[in-house]
Image: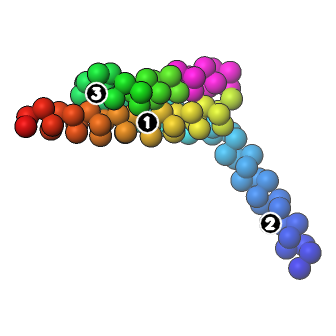
Amino acid sequence: MRTCGIGMATLAGGALLALGGCGNTLYAFQASSASSKLEEAQELGAEKHAPYEYYYAKLHLEKAMTEAAEADYGDAIDLAEVSEEYADKAIRLAREAHSGEGR
């Protein structure tokens, strides 16, 4: 049983190393998604209708880009995820504002 535990630890360590090698790819995917949603939020007028969420998303994406430029992909991915989450909120709020304007 002890060798199985060592094997699992080695396998887990190898998986972490493999993920570290593709951090830039994971970041690029996450940042692209966040950027697209932020652009959609802007097109919907989120700067006016959901300024907190919009600018929170925008600043997190900018910080993610800074972290990625310094090859800190773990933090860059986390920041891009937060950016995407808040861009989604901004999109939702902007759409709600538009539907309320027609009343």
What's the magenta region?
Answer: 61-71
At numbered mark 2, what does the secondary structure look like: helix, strand or loop? Answer: helix
Q: Nearer the viewer, residue 61 or 94?
A: 94
Q: Is residue 57 visible?
A: yes
Q: Earlier in the sequence, mark 1 or mark 3?
A: 3
- C-alpha separation, residue under disc 3 versus residue under disc 2: 50 Å
Find residue 29 and report its horizontal and vertical position in percent.
48, 37
Of pointers 1 and 2, the one earlier in the residue sequence: 2
Amino acid type indicated by mark 3: His
> Which quadrant of the figure has residue 71?
top right
Whichever of callouts 3 and 2 sits on the residue coming sooner in the sequence is 2
Per the image, label 3 sits on a secondary structure element best described as helix
Amino acid beneath label 1: Tyr
Most extreme residue toward the bottom, as rendered? 1
Tell me the crowding category of disc 3: few under 14, some 14 to 19, or many 20 or more residues within 10 angstroms, Cα based: many
Q: Which residue: 28% across, 27% down? A: 49
Residue 68 in magenta stretch? yes
Q: Amino acid at mark 2?
A: Met
Circles 1 and 2 in contact, beta carbons < 8 Å: no
- The residue carrying mark 3 is 49
Front disc: 1 or 2: 1
Disc 1 target residue: 86
The mark lying in front, picked from 1 and 3, is 3
Q: Is residue 29 visible?
A: no
Task: Categorize mark 2 by other alpha carbons within 10 Å: few (<14), some (14-19), many (20+).
Answer: few
For the point 7% across and 37% down, which residue is it?
103
Is 16 left or right of 79, judged from the image as shown? Answer: right
Q: Position of residue 33 (x, y in %)?
A: 42, 36
User: Which residue does the numbered mark 2 point to in the structure image?
Assistant: 8
